[in-house]
Image: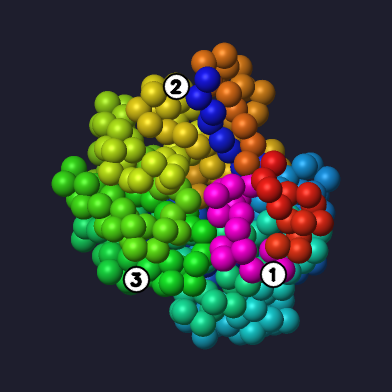
């Protein structure tokens, strides 16, 4: 019986203000209406997640909001912290203390910030999206493919277990998807740090987004499984593919990512997370649904784990996985 894994998590978006303005994005808010979370609010959600049996906390935000002077002023006034990285570092430390393993994706940050956050994260992430130059990214400076590949490489240099992936249906061509997968394969062959590659269809009714058919998605998943080394999981978000999940698993999907019973998918808010019982009923008996940590088991080694993370794993009895 094939095992399909998932991570029980809580999704905490620190702020939805972003310097990028991708034409398909449903997450970004303008400065005046942007959400900014305070540490006390974050702590409250962390304790709720622990009570609910979560193992992972996903910290996310818009890319490089601190580049806006007005945002920095508002952020400092409302949180008491000088930067998003400073606040997230404190939040990650608190999560580890409570017994939750942080997985942080703040978009493209500088190397020094990445190094700081690596100390308090079990894993981290950044979607490559595509190596193609697409119109959807014209107003999004950090969506430059070389910038994102360089960042993923830096994570490898720092030996951070890492999640990345492709957005599908944003104006890229079939050959672009192949090139993107090959670029990720090359990085993993060099650094060995990729845990999973997400194949995420973009759900948009806006002009210029034709989307992808089920057949195209299945073919791409099969291609991803063929190109990526066997130890790298191929993931699809179940809330974006619930009606076709078995077919996608047959094509090569082995993981369903983070699933939260407490918070929405803030990136795709109109697509609710499926209940675990619903997934089990849909997949069994052909497939076994199995919970995992945000750190894949083959990364539970000293060379991939910082001391604060090791201490938290040992305290919770997770040093060898679930």
In the displayed structure, would residue 229 be above or below residue 254?
Answer: below
SS label for mark 2: helix
Please state the horizontal and vertical placement of residue 35, each as a whole percent of the image: 62, 63
* Mark 2 vs mark 3, CA separation in Å: 35 Å
Q: What stretch is highlighted in magenta?
A: 293-309
**Relative to residue 85, is residue 26 drawn left or right?**
left
The residue drawn where x is 27% and y is 26% is 215
In the displayed structure, would residue 73 be above or below residue 173?
Answer: below
66 in magenta: no
**Relative to residue 264, is residue 180 drawn left or right?**
left
Image quadrant assignment for residue 258:
top right
Q: Residues within 10 Å of mark 3 (few under 14, many from 20)?
A: few
Q: The C terminus is located in which quarter?
A: top right
The residue drawn where x is 52% and y is 59% is 161
In the displayed structure, would residue 108 be above or below residue 273?
Answer: below
Q: Counting residues from the N terminus, which is met first, the one under dot 2 or under dot 3?
A: 3
Residue 307 badge: 1
Seen from the viewer's position, the closer of residues 112 and 32 is 112
SS label for mark 1: helix
299 in magenta: yes
Using the rendered image of the protein, determine whether residue 23 is visible from the camera's viewpoint. Answer: no
Q: Residues within 10 Å of mark 2 (few under 14, many from 20)?
A: some
Q: Which residue is the site of mark 2?
A: 246
| Pointers 3 and 1 in contact (C-beta within 8 Å) | no
* Mark 3 vs mark 1, CA separation in Å: 26 Å
Disc number lying in front (1 or 2):
1
Please state the horizontal and vertical placement of residue 85, each as a whole percent of the image: 60, 75
Using the rendered image of the protein, determine whether residue 149 is visible from the camera's viewpoint. Answer: yes
Seen from the viewer's position, the closer of residues 230 and 15 is 230
Q: Which residue is the site of mark 3?
A: 150
The residue drawn where x is 50% and y is 67% is 159
């Amino acid at each position: 019986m094939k095992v399909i894994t998932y991570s029980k998590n809580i999704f905490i978006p620190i702020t939805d203000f972003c310097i990028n303005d991708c034409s398909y994005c449903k997450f970004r808010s303008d400065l005046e209406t942007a959400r900014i979370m305070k540490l006390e609010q974050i702590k409250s959600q962390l304790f709720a997640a622990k009570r609910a049996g979560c193992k992972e906390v996903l910290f996310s935000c818009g890319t490089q909001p601190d580049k806006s002077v007005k945002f920095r002023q508002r952020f400092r006034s409302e949180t008491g912290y000088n930067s998003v990285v400073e606040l997230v570092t404190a939040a990650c430390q608190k999560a580890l203390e409570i017994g939750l393993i942080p997985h942080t994706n703040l978009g493209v940050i500088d190397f020094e910030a990445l190094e700081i956050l690596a100390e308090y994260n079990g894993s981290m992430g950044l979607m490559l999206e595509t190596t193609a130059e697409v119109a959807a990214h014209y107003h999004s400076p950090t969506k430059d493919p070389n910038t994102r590949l360089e960042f993923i490489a830096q994570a490898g240099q720092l030996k951070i277990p890492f999640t990345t992936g492709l957005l599908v249906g944003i104006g890229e061509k079939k050959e672009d998807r192949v090139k993107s997968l090959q670029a990720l394969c090359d990085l993993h062959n060099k650094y060995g740090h990729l845990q999973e590659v997400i194949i995420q269809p973009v759900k948009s009714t806006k002009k210029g987004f034709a989307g992808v058919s089920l057949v195209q998605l299945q073919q791409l998943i099969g291609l991803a499984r063929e190109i990526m080394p066997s130890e790298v999981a191929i993931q699809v978000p179940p809330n974006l593919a619930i009606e076709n999940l078995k077919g996608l698993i047959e094509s090569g999907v082995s993981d369903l990512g983070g699933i939260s019973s407490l918070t929405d998918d803030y990136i795709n808010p109109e697509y609710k997370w499926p209940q675990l019982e619903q997934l089990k009923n849909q997949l069994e008996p052909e497939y076994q649904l199995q919970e995992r940590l945000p750190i894949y088991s083959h990364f539970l080694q000293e060379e991939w784990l910082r001391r604060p993370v090791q201490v938290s794993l040992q305290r919770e009895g997770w040093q060898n996985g679930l």
